[in-house]
Amino acid sequence: MPMKTKKRALQQKSRAAAKPQRNKGMLKAPPVAVKGTASNAKAREAPGSKQAVLLALMRRRGGTTIDEAVTALGWRPHSIRTLISGVARKKLGLSVQTDRDDKGRLQYRIG
């Protein structure tokens, strides 16, 4: 075997030995949606966070519209809808209800 080939083979072996081996049989478990109650959700939200502000807006009697949440949080509308569907509904397991107001805008409420 030529010298360059031996050297290259040794380099590849040393790289393989230095790289941590991942156990391919150990995969992450899929996320499980846990149904919670409103009181459990309050315990899991950080006070003063944008998530807590949005949930407080949604807990009001009339709920909130996307426009009101955009003004309160300074986020884009698609980010607020993601927080509502992904975090409030799926992660926290809250019952999010949507209704249309007299102007035809969607209002989101936790109830």
Image (cartoon, rainbow, N blue to C red):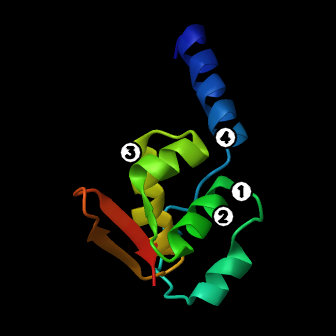
Q: Is residue 94 above or below residue 30?
A: below
The reply to whether callout 4 and callout 1 are in contact (CB within 8 Å) is: no
- Please give the count of numbered marks on the rendered protein: 4
Image marks 2 and 1: residues in contact by CB distance under 8 Å: yes
Q: Earlier in the sequence, mark 3 or mark 4?
A: 4
Q: Which mark is residue 52?
A: 2
Which of pointers 2 and 4 indicates the residue nearer the eye?
2
Indicate which label's residue lies in the foreground, 3 or 4.
3
Query: Which residue is at a point 58% across and 86% down the rendered structure image?
Result: 38
Q: Residue at x 72, y 38 (%)?
A: 18
Q: Residue at x 46, y 69 (%)?
A: 63
- Counting other residues with Cα less than 10 Å from the Cα at mark 3, is it few (<14), some (14-19), or many (20 or more)? few
Cα–Cα gap, marks 4 and 1? 39 Å
Looking at numbered disc 3 in the image, what kind of residue is underneath it? His
Asked if marks 2 and 4 touch (Cβ < 8 Å), the reply is no
Q: Label 3 to label 4, Cα distance in Å?
A: 40 Å
Q: Along the polypeptide, which appears first: circle 1 or circle 3?
A: 1
Q: Is residue 29 visible?
A: no
- Residue 80 seen from this side: yes
- Give the camera-side residue of 80 and 103: 103
Give neighbour class at mark 4: few <14, some 14-19, many 20+ (Cα, 10 Å): few
Q: Is residue 5 above or below residue 81?
A: above
* Residue where numbered disc 1 is placed: 49
